[in-house]
Amino acid sequence: MGNICRSPAGEAVMRHLVGAEGLAERIECDSAGTIAFHTGDPPDKRMHAAAANRSINTGGQARQICNDDYRSFDMILTMDDENLVNVRNMAPAGEWPAEVRPFCDFVTGSTATEVPDPYYGGPKGFETVLDLLEDGCASLLEHVRSQVAD
């Protein structure tokens, strides 16, 4: 929702994997929230610390999704059903190339259909989120790798 926990962590995990594969020049990753409440804020300190323990850097500032995102990206992934509905409802009128779908479509090691919001929970919640993000981002990278192949 606010782009300070799950989505910036997902962006960071994906950037980490993309960089490790030498694809940073070919695959662009970004994150945005569906509300502007935290615009300009850094990622949640607890998520930042949990990710740092896995050598993943969650830098950047929160922002809200904008019309250009629907035109600039091939895929927009959401962390839960509420955000999926919101992202689809916020889409600009007309045609846009971005495919909007749940992130958990790419998670293979769990039956989770949503990435839970860890904001009001304890440290274990942040670890659970990172586990899902690492799993899903690995599958996502395999999915997009074929689209950027030479």
Image (tube, rainbow, N blue to C red):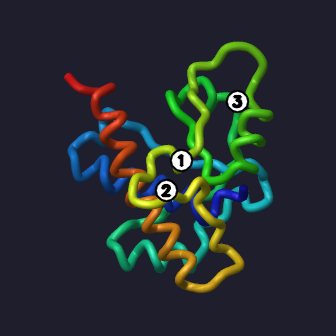
Give percent across and percent down for residue 105.
50, 44
Q: Earlier in the sequence, mark 1 or mark 3?
A: 3
User: For mark 3, does the 10 Å Cα neighbourhood hold few (<14), some (14 to 19), or many (20 or more) residues?
Assistant: few
Label 1 element class: helix
Q: Residue furthest front?
A: 111
- Disc 2 marks a residue whose amino acid type is Gly
Query: In the rendered image, which residue does mark 2 sit on?
Result: 10
Name the side, left or right, on which 66 lies relative to 129. right
Look at the image and tell me in which quarter the C terminus lies. top left
User: What distance separates the C-alpha of mark 3 from that of mark 2?
Assistant: 21 Å
Q: Earlier in the sequence, mark 2 or mark 1?
A: 2
Q: Nearer the viewer, residue 111 or 20?
A: 111
> Contact, CB < 8 Å: mark 2 with mark 1?
yes
User: What distance separates the C-alpha of mark 1 from that of mark 3?
Assistant: 20 Å
- Disc 1 marks a residue whose amino acid type is Phe
Give percent across and percent down for residue 65.
68, 41
Q: Residue at x 34, y 51 (%)?
A: 138
Query: In the rendered image, which residue does mark 1 sit on?
Result: 103
User: For mark 1, does the 10 Å Cα neighbourhood hold few (<14), some (14 to 19), or many (20 or more) residues?
Assistant: many
User: For mark 2, does the 10 Å Cα neighbourhood hold few (<14), some (14 to 19), or many (20 or more) residues?
Assistant: many
Give percent across and percent down for residue 24.
31, 42
- Disc 3 marks a residue whose amino acid type is Asn
Query: In the rendered image, which residue does mark 3 sit on?
Result: 67
Name the side, left or right, on which 112 lies relative to 140. right
User: What distance separates the C-alpha of mark 2 from that of mark 1?
Assistant: 9 Å
Q: Is residue 1 above or below residue 50?
A: above
Give percent across and percent down for residue 59.
49, 63
Q: Which mark is residue 119?
A: none
Label 2 element class: helix
Q: Is residue 56 above or below residue 85?
A: below
